[in-house]
Image (cartoon, grey):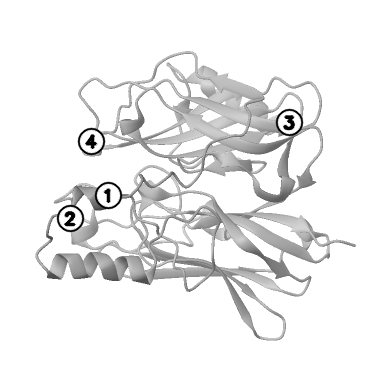
Amino acid sequence: MPPYLAAPCCAQYRHSWGLSDAQIATILDWVDTGAPEGSSSDRGAPISAPTAGLSRRDVSLAVTESYAPSPPRGSTDDVRCFVLDWPLAARSFVTGVEIESSERSLLHHVVIASVTGEDADRVAQRDREEPGPGFACNDGAGSLRGVTILGGGLLGGDFPEGIGMAVEPRSKIILNIHYSTVTARAGAVDRPSVHFRTDASARPATPLALTNPAWIVGDAMRVRAGDRDAVYFYRYRPRVSTRGRTMYLRAVSPHMHTFGSRITVRVLRANGERACVLEIPKWRFGWEQLYWLQDSIRLDPEDELYLECHFDNSAENQPVPGATPRDFTFGGDSQDMCAAFLSMTEAPR
């Protein structure tokens, strides 16, 4: 039973599989009474999955060569970016995504993105330069700036309310897959594929990557060895992305790696009020996903976005047990990140 990481006191999300207080109380009562076996006649129907997949598959893309994850020495994690050609000749909108894997036990999480123009050329070049399918991308997607996040996590389904992410002709699709060999069988390989629902028109979503540029280009986000709770935060008024208009936040995908322990995204209103977008009090890298808000959150031109990340670099929290802690910075091998990818729609005129 995977955990549902988002704190319910912050906001409500579509397709949540978190347990209610009453359900938690039922489990605790059962444990306290010695976990008695129930009657088979009282057995309920199986619980359905949070989503039922795509309503239709309009575009399907597959990696043509199997990949055998190869973590660096002392690690069980391998992050790989696979590059796929977008086949549609006209501008279209992705209105749903779904990932498939030939070896699901290897998958920790997946981020699906699109790039166009020079960035598309760069990822194609990186793919050609490295042997085998794809290229190593512990730094996300090769430190690209023009990435549009189309989906994330291991769940699939249609986007709500006719929302769509625009994809241009001649774009490249990136499958950023975090593999873990902890529970995989010996010799396991993967040949992933991705399916899209597409429409010629949709309620367009504006993507926004929320992170401090100073963390990326230098060592402004340095977490010292042994620090159990290093905290970094960033506030940003996104006028360039919003063009000075009122927007509505629809979805958020948080991003940290294995040292991350807590992440929060908020709206700081010009009048001093705060609106919570997402809070994950106990971060787990393996359950990273796209969270669709049940109710959109208004973002006015004078409001700011706020991102806060906590990191645990103590000896007890090393990715490799027994390893000696060392300083790390943003991105790169064996390092961490602090970012959130947001999707917004314009307010009705």
Residue 90 appears in view: yes
Q: Is residue 228 visible to the viewer in this orientation of the structure?
A: no
Residue designated by label 2:
38
CB contact under 8 Å: marks 1 and 2: yes
Nearest to N terminus: mark 3 or mark 4: 3
Residue at 28 percent across and 61 percent down: it is: 313
Question: What amino acid is found at the position of numbered circle 1 in the picture?
Answer: Arg
Query: Mark 2 is on which residue type?
Result: Gly
State if disc 4 and disc 2 touch (CB < 8 Å): no
Question: Sequence-wise, which precedes: disc 1 or disc 2?
Answer: 2
**61 relative to 192 in the view: left or right:** right
Q: Position of residue 20 (x, y in %)?
A: 39, 67
Secondary structure category for the residue under label 1: loop
Q: CA distance from mark 3 to mark 4?
A: 39 Å
Find the distance from the CA under tag 1 to the CA under tag 2. Answer: 8 Å
Quadrant location of residue 117?
A: top right
Q: For mark 4, give the secondary structure.
A: loop
Circle 3 — which element? helix
Residue holding disc 1:
43
Q: Which residue lies under the disc numbered 3?
A: 117
- The disc, 2 or 3, on the residue closer to the chain's N-terminal end is 2
Residue linked to disc 4: 183
Q: Position of residue 287 (x, y in %)?
A: 39, 49
Which quadrant holds the C terminus? bottom right
C-alpha gap between disc 2 and disc 4: 31 Å
| Image height of 201 relative to 286, above or below | above
| Alpha carbons under labels 4 and 1: distance apart | 30 Å
In this picture, residue 168 sits left or right of residue 230? right
- For the residue marked with disc 3, what is the amino acid? Gly
Task: For marks 2 and 4, give the one nearer the viewer.
Answer: 2
